């Protein structure tokens, strides 16, 4: 081994120690051949690490050559021998011999370099390649002639390596050792006393090689010397050292150089044979020399990365046994035949999307065994990724984040790391690292619309689905699971949860109750969508529910009023012309839209050819001239129908009296019978009311007649006729006929009173200023409006009295209805007070 090789190895070892000291790493020294499981060192203590850190960080050993001689016991925090270590197999003659590996921890990612020096023990004795060495030496060999002996090989190093040689005691030869720069020794046997073939044809000797170990080991080789006749001259090389070079991976048989030696003898004593005498390395496996020509050629492929320099010892021998030696120094020239190798030391599979820039996600080492520019490596990643590479010393690289991450934009990153050397042509290697971005709850749910509007038909079944709203969350898994809930609010003082509910999972809005358009036409509320993150994020949206009207209300007859205590008749004079307005049926429908559009038609009548009903306005008119043949008593049934689907209707009975005088009307309507049977309580109230009203009315009449009798006589006659009474049609209050059509084209003032039972609702109307209507009860009484006059004749007084009595009958019927209603109210008040 040359001086340059030794200096290079020392430099590398010093550089290694410097690197470890800079990073504060640990070095150990152990002897070879330690048994499996033996303790190397307490790495946790020496690195200042806690045992929990070793476990939580998933501590592991990384070696470049994948051979694991040492293992880490994380429970004890110690390094143990995993496989038996043979220093000679591991390092050969290289010193120092050390194992270099790294301990890698995660969360956070840390890297520690560990050096374990393997010291030699004296477990190998010196040995010779050949157990027997043969020489043919002429008896004429002069004193001082040198004979190079085969050197022994000792796999141990240092003091345990080969130290000296010994030759057994003899008279002819002594041993001389020459030290070489690489520490080896050339062994020469020197003739100190001439040989005499006649005395001794052969001379056996024993060469012993010893090492410096304790205990000392040795090896021997037998030397057989055959004494020949005279050979005066030894071969001589033209130069002691030859130099050559070879490119790595050169083809087999490549010529390196040619050595040359000369011998002054003639004949067979001048024939020279060349041979390689290296026995300590694999030189003879890599090179061969032609025995006759001395041409040195390659036998195998050399590799610069394995051996960069060879030193070959060549011996020239003649037939007389005389020899000479020289050295051939061969330098291996490097070529860019190795692409960079990338070894991933640690790589995170998952990173949180809220990680800040500068987080280490991977660690790898790049090596290129080539030299110079061929071994200078640069690594890079794609520019459009939020990651960058940071180079540390000795080929270590870390992959770190250099920008914010967003899982919603990119949930998985495939990081391709490419490493190129600077050789010509350049060689490259690449690895692909997959990194998944874990989700954090950084996105609130978003509704598809900024607001929602929906409708539901009234009288719906509670629990039906109205519509579905949807919110989406860009996050993943639990963070994207959306739950829906109603925000607290009220509708007309009632919590909105009493009207609708929302399915927490699907977002379906369901009705809680049945809606009534007439009570509630629309309402609004807010729905909140909340995700399942921690902390949760939410958003809300406004929802408007509109109640659609359904034709669920029948038309209500406002006029004429239907009473059970008396019959109301409209008086039509027989002289009325065609188109005479008898009365007007007034009705309303609390529904809306087309459900409230009312139409009127005559369902049945005593004489259908006499009357007609306006389809749109409900006006009852005559359609021909009244004749004497027409009955005084006419009964009409008018149907009021709305425009809903299906339509609803109400029927009103209208009694019409065709007469020019009241007696005629009275005689006809006395025969009216009532279909309804009154109960005992109603009869009692009617009798009581009749008695009270009759008494009060008689007193009032006496007072009025006595006061007005005088005034009537002074005034002019207001009413003179042959027993005929003027019949004035009744018009509702504020009625004005504008000649148009429609359900409610005229103005009416009315008050609507409703009890707790809608079926018992009564309608009260403001009374007209002047009524031309006759109200008759079953007793035949009639009442006419009060007509003021100046002079009253006895006949007029009698006639007026009859009118007053008719009016009393009307009031009696109305009072009976009033008493009936009062009785129901009193019963309700009594029951309420009792409770």
Image: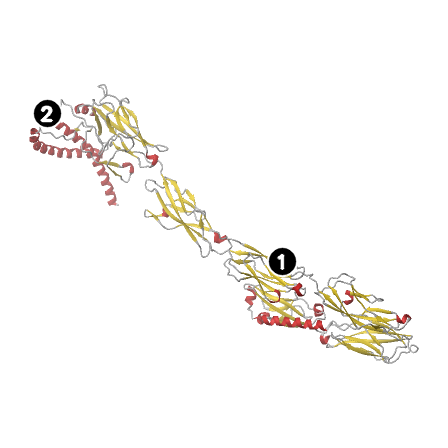
Nearer to me, 96 or 765: 96
Q: Is residue 727 left or right of residue 219?
A: left
The relative height of residue 624 versus residue 813 in the rendered view (above or below) is above
* Residue 311 picture location, percent across and down: 76, 70
Label 1 SS: strand
Q: Where's the N terminus, which quadrant?
A: bottom right
Residue 812 found in image quarter:
top left
Q: Is residue 287 left or right of residue 393?
A: right
- Circle 1: is it few (<14), some (14-19), or many (20+) Cα within 10 Å? some
Is residue 316 in view from this perspective? Answer: yes
- Pointer 1: what residue? 430
- Circle 2: is it few (<14), some (14-19), or many (20+) Cα within 10 Å? few
Which disc number belongs to residue 480? none
Residue 756 found in image quarter:
top left
Whichever of callouts 2 and 1 sits on the residue coming sooner in the sequence is 1
Task: Look at discs 2 and 1 and give the one toward the viewer.
Answer: 1
Residue 246 found in image quarter:
bottom right
* Residue 328 picture location, percent across and down: 78, 70
Nearer to me, 484 or 20: 20
Q: CA distance from mark 2 to mark 1?
A: 133 Å
Q: Are marks 2 and 1 in contact (CB under 8 Å)?
A: no
* Residue 578 picture location, percent across and down: 24, 23
């Amino acid at each position: 081994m040359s001086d340059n090789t030794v200096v290079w190895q020392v430099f590398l070892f010093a550089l290694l120690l410097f690197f470890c000291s800079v990073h504060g790493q640990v070095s150990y020294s152990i002897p070879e051949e330690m048994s499996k499981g033996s303790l190397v060192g307490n790495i946790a203590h020496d690195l200042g690490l806690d045992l929990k850190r070793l476990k939580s960080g998933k501590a592991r050993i990384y070696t470049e050559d994948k051979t694991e001689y040492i293992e880490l016991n994380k429970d004890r925090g110690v390094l143990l021998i995993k496989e038996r270590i043979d220093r000679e197999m591991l390092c050969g003659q290289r010193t120092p011999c050390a194992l270099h590996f790294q301990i890698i921890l995660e969360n956070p990612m840390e890297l520690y370099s560990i050096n374990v020096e393997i010291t030699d023990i004296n477990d190998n004795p010196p040995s010779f390649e050949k157990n027997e060495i043969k020489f043919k030496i002429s008896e004429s060999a002069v004193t001082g002639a040198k004979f190079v002996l085969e050197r022994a090989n000792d796999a141990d190093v240092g003091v345990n390596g080969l130290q000296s040689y010994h030759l057994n005691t003899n008279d002819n030869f002594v041993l001389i050792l020459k030290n070489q720069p690489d520490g080896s020794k050339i062994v020469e046997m020197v003739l100190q006393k001439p040989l005499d073939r006649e005395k001794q044809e052969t001379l056996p000797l024993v060469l012993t090689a010893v090492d410096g170990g304790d205990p000392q080991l040795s090896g021997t080789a037998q030397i057989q010397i055959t004494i020949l006749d005279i050979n005066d001259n030894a071969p001589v090389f033209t130069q002691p050292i030859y130099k050559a070079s070879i490119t790595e991976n050169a083809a087999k048989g490549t010529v390196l150089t040619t050595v040359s030696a000369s011998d002054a003898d003639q004949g067979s004593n001048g024939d020279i044979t060349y041979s390689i005498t290296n026995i300590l390395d694999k030189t003879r496996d890599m090179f061969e020399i032609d025995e006759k020509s001395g041409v040195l050629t390659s036998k195998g492929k050399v590799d610069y990365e394995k051996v960069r320099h060879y030193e070959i010892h060549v011996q020239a021998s003649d037939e007389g046994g005389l020899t000479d030696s020289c050295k051939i120094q061969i330098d291996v020239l490097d070529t860019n035949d190795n692409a960079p190798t990338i070894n991933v030391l640690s790589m995170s599979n998952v990173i949180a999307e809220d990680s800040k820039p500068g987080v280490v996600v991977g660690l790898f080492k790049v090596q290129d065994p080539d030299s110079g520019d061929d071994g200078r490596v640069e690594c890079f990643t794609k520019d459009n990724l939020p990651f960058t590479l940071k180079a540390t010393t000795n080929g270590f690289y870390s992959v770190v984040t250099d920008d914010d991450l967003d899982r919603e934009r990119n949930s998985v990153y495939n990081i391709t790391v490419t490493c190129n050397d600077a050789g010509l042509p350049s060689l490259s290697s690449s690895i692909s690292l997959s990194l998944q971005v874990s989700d954090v709850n950084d996105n609130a749910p978003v509704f598809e619309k900024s607001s929602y509007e929906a409708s539901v038909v009234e009288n719906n079944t509670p629990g039906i689905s109205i519509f579905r709203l949807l919110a989406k969350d860009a996050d993943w898994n639990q963070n994207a699971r959306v739950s829906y809930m109603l925000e607290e609010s009220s509708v007309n003082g009632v919590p909105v949860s009493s009207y609708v509910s929302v399915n927490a999972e699907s977002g379906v809005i369901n009705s809680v109750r049945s809606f009534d358009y007439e009570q509630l036409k629309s309402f609004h509320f807010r729905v909140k969508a909340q995700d399942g993150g921690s902390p949760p994020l939410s958003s809300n949206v406004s929802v408007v529910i509109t109640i659609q009207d359904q034709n669920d209300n029948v038309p209500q007859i406002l006029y004429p009023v239907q009473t059970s205590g008396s019959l109301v008749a409209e008086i039509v004079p027989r002289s009325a012309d065609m188109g005479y307005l008898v009365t007007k049926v007034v009705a309303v429908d609390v529904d809306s839209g087309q459900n409230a559009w009312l139409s009127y038609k005559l369902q049945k009548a005593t004489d259908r050819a006499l009357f007609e009903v306006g389809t749109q306005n409900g006006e009852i008119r005559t359609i021909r001239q009244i004749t004497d043949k027409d009955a005084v008593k006419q009964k009409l049934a008018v149907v009021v129908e709305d425009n809903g689907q299906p339509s609803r209707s109400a029927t009103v009975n209208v009694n019409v009296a065709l007469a020019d005088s009241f007696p005629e009307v009275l005689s006809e309507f006395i025969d009216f019978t009532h279909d309804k049977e009154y109960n005992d309580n109603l009869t009692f109230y009617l009798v009581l009311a009749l008695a009270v009203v009759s008494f009060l009315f008689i007193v009032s009449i006496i007072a009025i007649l006595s006061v007005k009798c005088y005034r009537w006589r002074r005034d002019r006659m207001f009413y003179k006729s042959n027993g005929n009474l003027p019949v004035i049609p009744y018009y509702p209050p504020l009625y004005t006929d504008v000649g148009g059509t429609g359900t409610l084209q005229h103005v009416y003032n009315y008050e609507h009173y409703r009890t707790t039972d809608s079926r018992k609702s009564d309608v009260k109307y403001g009374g007209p200023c002047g009524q031309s209507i006759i109200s008759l009860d079953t007793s035949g009484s009639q009442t006419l409006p009060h007509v003021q006059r100046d002079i009253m004749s006895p006949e007029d007084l009698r006639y007026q009295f009859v009118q007053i009595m008719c009016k009393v009958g009307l009031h009696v019927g109305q009072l009976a209805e009033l008493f009936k209603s009062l009785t129901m109210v009193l019963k309700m008040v009594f029951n309420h007070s009792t409770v």
